[in-house]
Structures are given as structure tokens and as C-alpha cells.
Amino acid sequence: MKKTNAMRILDGLKIPYETLSYDDDGEHELSRGAAERTAATLGIDAGAVFKTIVMRTDKKETVVFCQDARHEINLKKARAACGAKEVSPVKSDELPALTGYVRGGCSPLGMKRKFRTFIDQRALDHEKIFVSAGTRGEQIALAPADLVRATSAHVADLALEP
């Protein structure tokens, strides 16, 4: 398997991780449950799979959020976490130039630039969590505290409650 930028960063920080591969179905719309399908395909808890959501604030700052597959991100909580009046998702066609990643293969690690990152507090409830390895069909499993450290993330309550 070819190393991704995300893997090289973890290697450089001497952070242990595992990789899991799966057949990518090509469907990556969050509204259609892509992260939940990834969890089902890999036979893992959807609450431990964290999707990477890249957003832009009203001040044109790019921010990254990691939210578990069972919950949508609460935009009010996301705004509060990053101190913005407004946040909106970056369009799919903008992701490659901005982050170096495509939708469905966007990792919070190894983007073209380091953006402020926020991870939902539910990550800390798990021994290990799963995030994209930076390519479709590959996930990285690691301790949540290690992801926080590797991304210099802030931990916050970001989930939209049903």
C-alpha cells in the first residue's frame, strides 16, 4: 500500500496507527450516509468513524471539523467553536486545490496547509477512531488523543442532537 500524506505525518510523529482498506462505492455525499456505509463495510462502530468536513467562515477562514458518522454537525456549535458568525461547507470542486484531497478521501491530516481543526468530543469516548487516510477506500485507525495531537485540534461538542 502506498503511504499517504496523513500516514507520513503520523510516522514522523511516531504515532501508532493501523490502516483499513475497503472497496469505494463512489458515493460520498454526507447526506446519503457515506460515513455510515464505510463503517458497515468495515464492520466497525459508526460512532467511531469520523468524517472530515471542511468549512469556510464569514471571514474567509478555512476550518476543519471531524464529526462522528452517527451525527450531523451542529452549525451553531461549529460557529461557536471557531468563533465565527457564519460557517458553510466548502464546495466539493474546491477541495482538491484547497486541501489536496477529494470528497470521500479528505483526511484531517496532511492537507496542503494546516487549518484550525475541531474534533467532536465523542471521539474521546473511543479507544480508537477511524478517519480517512487521505484517499478513497482507506481509513486510518488511531487513538483519539493522538489525532488531537497530530492536528493540534480543539475538542468541542459539535453534534446535532436528534
Image (cartoon, rainbow, N blue to C red):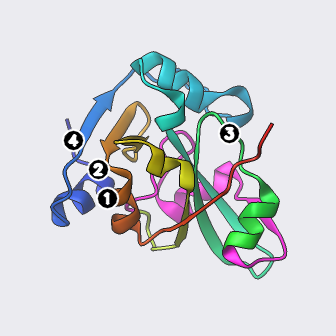
Q: Amino acid at mark 3?
A: His
SS assignment at label 2: loop
Task: Please provide percent x and percent y for residue 82.
Answer: 67, 74
* Residue 19 horizontal side relative to residue 152, left or right: left
Q: Which residue is mark 1?
A: 146
Tell me if mark 4 has few (under 14), some (14-19) or many (20+) residues whose alpha carbon lies within 10 angstroms of its own. few
Tell me if mark 2 has few (under 14), some (14-19) or many (20+) residues whose alpha carbon lies within 10 angstroms of its own. some
- Seen at 19% across and 35% down, the residue is 1
Q: Which residue is mark 2?
A: 4
Q: Amino acid at mark 4?
A: Lys
In this view, the mark in front (2 or 3): 3
* Residue 126 horizontal side relative to residue 47, left or right: left
Q: Which residue is mark 4?
A: 2
Q: Nearer the viewer, residue 40 or 4?
A: 40
> Which quarter of the rendering shows the C terminus?
top right
- Seen at 32% across and 49% down, the residue is 143
Q: Nearer the viewer, residue 33 or 91?
A: 33
Q: Which mark is residue 64?
A: none
| Sequence-wise first label, 3 or 1 | 3
Q: Nearer the viewer, residue 92 or 128?
A: 128
Q: Residue furthest front?
A: 125
Task: Please provide percent x and percent y for residue 139.
Answer: 37, 37
In this view, the mark in front (2 or 1): 1
Q: Residue furthest bottom?
A: 59
Tell me if mark 1 has few (under 14), some (14-19) or many (20+) residues whose alpha carbon lies within 10 angstroms of its own. some
* Magenta span of residues: 82-110
Q: Which residue is mark 3?
A: 71
